[in-house]
Amino acid sequence: MSTRLANGGRLIDRSKPKNFTFNGKRMKGYEGDTLAAALLGEDQMLMGRSFKYHRPRGVVASGAEEPNALVNLGQGERFEPNQRVTTTELFDGLTCTSQNHWPSLEFDVGVVNNYASRFLPAGFYYKTFMAPAAAWKHVFEPIIRKSAGLGQVPTEADADRYEHYYHHTDVVIIGGGVAGLASALAAGRSGAKVLVMEQTHHWGGRAAVDGGEIDGQSVDAWIDATLAELEGMENVTLRTRMMASGVYDHGYVLGYERVADHTPGDGRPRHRLWRIRTKQIVTATGAIERPLSFAGNDIPGVMLASAVRDYVVNWGVSIGDRTVVVTNNDDGYRTALTLKEAGLEVPVVLDARAEATGPLAEAARAAGIRVEAGKAIAKVHGGKRVTGVSVCLQAGEGSALEEIKCDAVAMSGGWSPVVHMWSHCGGKLIWDEAQAHFRPDPNRAPTSHDGEAFVVTAGTASGAMSLADTLEDAYAAGKAAGKAAGGKAIRKAGPKADAESEQPMAPVWIMPQGAGPKKRMKMWLDYQNDVKVSDVQLAAREGYESVEHTKRYTTLGMATDQGKLSNINGLAVLSDALDQEIPTTGTTTFRPPYTPISFGAIAGEARHEIFQPIRRTPMHQWHEDAGAYMEPVGHWRRPYCYAKPGETNEQAVHREVLNTRENLGLLDASTLGKLIVKGPDAGKFMDMMYTNMMSNLAVGKCRYGLMCSENGFLSDDGVVARIDEETWLCHTTSGGADRIHAWMEEWLQTEWWDWKVYVANVTEQLAQVAVVGPNARKVLEKLNAQAGGGMDLSAEALPFMQWADGKIGDFDARAYRISFSGELSYEIAVPASQGRAFWDALLEAGEEFGVMPYGTECLHIMRAEKGFIMIGDETDGTVIPQDLGLNWAISKKKEDFLGKRAQERSHMTDPERWKLVGLETLDGSVLPDGAYAVGEGNNVHGQRNMIGRVTSTYYSPTLKKGIAMGLVKHGPDRMGEVIDFPTVDGSNTVIKARICDPVFYDKEGAKQNV
Amino acid sequence: MLILECPYCGVMADETDLHGGGEAHLKRFGPGSSDDEFETYLFHRKNPKGVHFERWRHVSGCGKWFHAARNTMTLEVYGTYPAQTYEPPKELVAKIKKKHPEWGGYE
Amino acid sequence: MSNAVSALQGASFDGYCKVEEAGLTGMITLRGDLASKGVAKAVKAVTGAAMPGQGEVTEGDKGRVGWMSPDELLLIVDHAEAPAIVDAATASLGDEHSLVVNVSDARAVYRVKGAACREIIAKLAPADTSVMQPGMLRRTRIAQVPAAFYLEDDETAVVVCFRSVAQYAFDLLKDAAQPGGEVGVL
């Protein structure tokens, strides 16, 4: 059994116990524990079930590489699934539950998959569920969804807050082990601005567990002294609980800081995502030990040798009383010696190498440990817990020579540098034969905007496997990074350790090397996704030669751990099956994040009210207070209608239309874009921007204009006012202000930069109110009468399509006599700061005239009754003004305007183009929006030929019937003809509509011109 | 994520502060041009593997358009320069040529 | 104008920095040739401030002047005076090609006060706030909207954004200034 030892544990404080629960069971750990250490300390070896076969699984590692031990952490609004116990800090009151089993962890029905495992090989899904299609949807998918999978989905909204933080620095050092600290010393001494980030909450990494001396002191003492020196440097920032999630182009690094995971609910942001821009990056990310592939290597109690050692030294936790060590390198002996020193039994060290002659093997023998060279594990015994191993020859096929009782197995298959951060941005790898691992190729580093390398590796991340080499490499890396980032060259020597001699490791990819199919089906490569040696070999036999294809076919390395333990072993097995060298097979692509990061961290502050910017007009609050139903228009929110109590939105819209036509309506038109164009060349520029002639617009007058893209397509429209000799004011659509402003600037900056024109966007400077209806003039004149405003609003002084500046009431106003409704209408702009007061004044003064505010839907209906087009309804990016019968607004005199050349192209002048007409149903009903009209015959696909479509359709309260506009082939030549609109609601009916003039109301325009 | 120096502001601007605008130094063809010329102007764009001249706008900074000479493979930025020009500065072309003698030059 | 109100009418929040809407502030966009004597003269006349260089903001007895782009300045003046200053600057510029326009009401202005004022902005803007000193102005974005900021003194940052997103910007700054969110590296 695993247990807490009486002594030891360099990271825990036994005077500070912490209580927690696992599957409802009360347990105790200590401050400094990871959840993994605390669970093991309470003999909780079984922690979950595997993804596919539901095999019992325990923790296998001690850090971020852990594939097995994932739990549901927390409860309710702080519940999160798939949390690695090895990277979860213990805190008082922590609650967690195991995942992927039913009904319980101990007894899991899903384990039948295990017994059926030979029917669930690689590519099982692809092979099984090809046909019939319905079987997948109704049979297989529901079963698989129930039995496969990891944690549960949270059911409550996340109670925590998150934030981003932009940081700019010279050097980022990723990893706070001894290599990271040595690099930080060098970079810090160079004077460069340095950020050091460490993913755990303690500094120094694993070096202290491995032992040795640095500069004549213990590793722990050196770490403390170095931290003290670094803390004294103003240019160095040290950050724990912060993992580098990814390295991106041009020195961009994402740092994932777990601020309050261990102190939930303390008011701090739970996670902070650091968005770092740096000149140089040092990756001191260490190395990860590889498992060995032997039968039963996934049974709880089989662990990485380094992890077994970590639990003893760091947390005072033993995995078992009797631990068999199996290794292909010297490092495994460190675990044997550590266990022995802690008073635990090591019945044997099985060394797969033919000889075991290194100093560490000798030390083990000297400590009385039995060492067997050339031996391997034939099979691990046990189900939910290791009970023993069968020993065999590594060179053979696995005949058991002996059975050894034990309750733990510590395996070491050699070490692989953590190359993720190096590789994210294109750093290349080389295969190191001696260490049997891929390591960064310093000659092919990722390059930055200046073409120079910006990532350098340090220590074991470079492939330096001894303490002495690590320190030397890391100090040099820090020095180089500091200098490259603009720091000064330093001469002070770095930390030193004594060189040690080691016996070379021997690559072992399958144990024993001649293992037959039965054994290979029990050798796990990817624990989390349940991928075995036999699966990879099957994939190779079935023709998956590319490592990227094999990965996807077998799902090797595709679990939440991204194959940190399994990748190299999998590559080796694949290479062997393909009979090629490992470097020929190559690696899969390393992509961020290094380990999964929370969605909260990615979203940062963008949640709730600040999920996205909401644009508000100066009258916005009034609309909300009035209970308006708001609709999004770009980022604006505009009132759709103002329903009164007991009224539906539709009824409200109809009331607003009738009231505006009969009495007085007010529209908050502040969202309309307003651009000032000024300069000696402004007229020439306006003529290029608009299809109409704008240079000859008289000062004081207004003109409706169209803007097209260079493709000729209609892009925006609005009324232009000539302010003075050199100045025009352009109204754009509500959604179009920023786009059209940018469009104008683009042409002025990149094509006609010699033209003297300035543009300014004054959209938000002005609140604009459309005062509409037969009583419009009366209410404004009343305001003037009340407060002595001087603007003459009479038809004579301010006729239709003119504008004037002055005072209306006591407001600084500009009034435009323009109408989008067909009624007498003034659009009045006042400074935004006065907007709300102006709106209030109009409502008060308008009461006797039957004033009512109206929303966007009323606006739409009134414009449709008048046959006015709407950008986005009648246009969709493929419609030219000529399609809409707007030829009157396209100048024939101008040599050029944006879109003119395109409109001369053959497709644009094709008489077959669909053109705008009005549509009225024979029965007065409302045509469905977007409905298509069908003609005679079928197209090449056997579908009915289309001859037109509806672009706008409404019930007209004014005319008491459905009205619509649409684009119809030869439409304007077919006035009075009836065309068919089949419905798509399943009723199989056809709506018949007559083609008519799109102007349904007041064709002469008499009402607006009074 | 790229950083480009805005030649107007002098700041190293984050990609999120910028808006990409495609190939630089296009010649506009308007009325009077042939169908082929117009088609080329409107639709045909270079897509080189290697040195490329492109348009960027410092959209949440000064709002100005500028040009960048950038390597589409390595993402190296050889230089940025104002947009008010018909072709890249000679010194910049020379600098790129020196670095990549095999490069065919600006055309 | 008694009817005039700023977007958030002086809303404020006390976090680990204080965030407050500055109320009505006069703001004028001036576009022109920044190298010309005429522009410098007009700017001096209406604000008392010298011409700012690239990325700078200068201060005069009647207002501040910020460098916004190679052909654009932002004049920060008294709100009520702004219309008259627009007229005065326009008159001073005479025939010189330029555009002077009142944008006071198109903006919302915030002060972030406290030792950590740079840090608050660093949570929202990709700009390097650590190098910012009084006298410098940076146009950038805060979260999803354009913004400009400068320092009035070492512990007072002024953030300017568009009026329509005033509430969003205030909520962003408030969120960033929540106690417990201290980063502590600037």
Image (cartoon, helix red, strand yellow):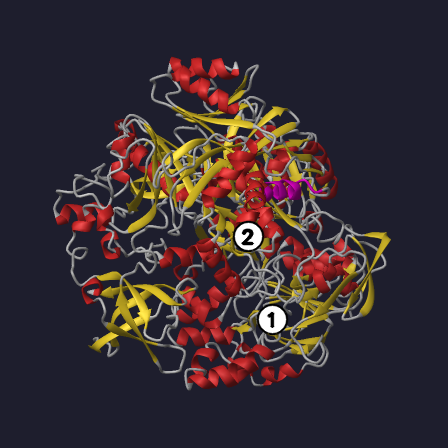
- What number of labels is visible? 2
State whether residue A35 is above or below residue A196.
below
State whether residue A21 is above or below residue A457.
below
* Magenta stretch encompasses residue C173: yes
Q: What stretch is highlighted in magenta?
A: C167-178
Could you tell whether B7 is left or right of A973 in the image? right
Q: Residue A376 carries which label?
A: 1
On the image, the x and y values in percent for residue A505 come to 56, 58
Q: Residue A418 carries which label?
A: 2
**CB of mark 2 within 8 Å of CB of mark 1?**
no
Residue B35 is at least partly visible in this image? yes
The kind of residue on which mark 1 rests is: Ala
The kind of residue on which mark 2 rests is: Val
Q: Residue furthest right?
A: A15
Mark whose residue sits in front, 2 or 1: 2
Camera-nearest residue between A497 and A220: A220
Camera-nearest residue between B91 and C97: C97
Q: Is mark 1 on a helix, strand or loop?
A: strand
Label 1: chain letter: A
Could you tell whether A830 is left or right of A211 in the image? left
